Image (tube, rainbow, N blue to C red):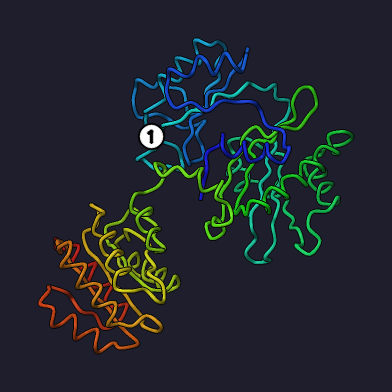
Amino acid sequence: MNIHEYQAKAVLREFGLPVSNGKAIFKAAEAEAAARELGGPLWVVKSQIHAGGRGKGKFKEPEAGEKGGVRLAKSVEEVKTFAEQMLGRTLVTVQTGEAGKQVNRLYIEEGSDIETEFYLSMLVDRETGRVAFVVSTEGGMDIEQVAHDTPEKIVTFSVDPATGIMPHHGRAVAKALRLAGPLAKEAEDLTARLYRAFVAKDMSMLEINPLIVTKDGHLKCLDAKISFDSNSLYRHPEIVQLRDTTEEDEKEIEASKYDLAYIALEGTIGCMVNGAGLAMATLDIIKLYGEEPANFLDVGGGASEEKVTAAFKIITADPNVKGILVNIFGGIMKCDVIANGVIAAVRAVGLQVPLVVRLEGTNVEKGKEIIRSSGLNVIPADDLDDAAQKIVAAVRQR
């Protein structure tokens, strides 16, 4: 689960981390009061969307002006103008794709005198099972380019969970950022606090970009992006309350109600598969034959008929779907259950696009018989390769 920058900074503030003062607003009419409360003389007006690259982004609407999604204001009037221009407009960044995202919230923050910009992030390293730090002297909006062109400027290390955060980790951060004296001490303290926040809140990713040194010689988290491990949210009702469903795909929200692993993609072939590995293989073979998958959908190993029906409805709700491929290997999941779920869903929502079904495994003959006797126009497939070729051909004939 992702949260907005202003929410992330509130979480960091709980752990005593240095962040700027700011106010979140939802209406342009709230901008003046927020700016006057912060005092100025410099304000930063930041679009709040779940995507990076806001500063270099562009709004679709000409009324929003030519500046990006993060703007520097030198007067209260400018704050008001920017708020009126940005709220309700569609911001397109390198991470949103061409569709962009509508800006429904702004964060008005006091300006900072920046001496130096750094990059610092934390994530769970799946290979080692540890929390890893990623640190670079090259902070700012072009960190992706730094990683591509000069990876030697990025320092990484991990923390052994048996010991937790130790002073030498903070010294490693200070060394990587070439900090000395009081700033090195601040880096050590900041590292420890970030780690405690990361572990205490079950984060999966924490990015500070940039981490800055102010002109008066202190470290400050000037931006913050946090993602949480969705499997741990039951432990954090206070974090669940921060969820902004307007930033999420409606189909993904519906899928979460049925505990379905669903991710919307941009293709035309809807996929319903059981097992993440088989689902990835299905997506790959669709691309191999020249088409694009419309989604990743793993119904899991023990899905019920109700779950399968819900999954099918979610796929057909996507207007971009021009064909559907059901690819099931029945182990715990029985092929006849899948077949009944597919038939129930088709009868409930109708079938306007070609449907290819490949079943294999437990109760496969029962499942095939259910499909055959349904009277529905379903294309059977013998294996994954056959299924992929048939659905691609069916889509191209439409």
Q: How many callouts does the rendering have?
A: 1
Where's residue 145, x and y in %? Answer: 58, 43
Note whether 292 is above or below 99 in the view shown. Answer: below
Q: Nearer the viewer, residue 397 or 201?
A: 201
Rendering quarter of residue 304: bottom left
Where's residue 149, x and y in %? Answer: 62, 46
Note whether 357 is above or below 22 in the view shown. Answer: below
Q: Residue at x 52, y 30 (%)?
A: 55
Note whether 182 is above or below 44 in the view shown. Answer: below
Q: Which residue has dot 1 on it?
A: 102
In the rendered image, the quadrant that contains the C terminus is bottom left
Answer left or right for 112 relative to 71: right
Residue flagged by tag 1: what amino acid is it?
Answer: Gln
Note whether 152 is above or below 393 in the view shown. Answer: above
Q: Residue furthest right?
A: 181
Where's residue 104, x and y in %? Answer: 41, 31
Q: Residue at x 37, y 63 (%)?
A: 258
Answer left or right for 129 relative to 363: right
Where's residue 182, x and y in %? Answer: 87, 33
Q: Residue furthest left?
A: 375
Q: Residue at x 68, y 54 (%)?
A: 199
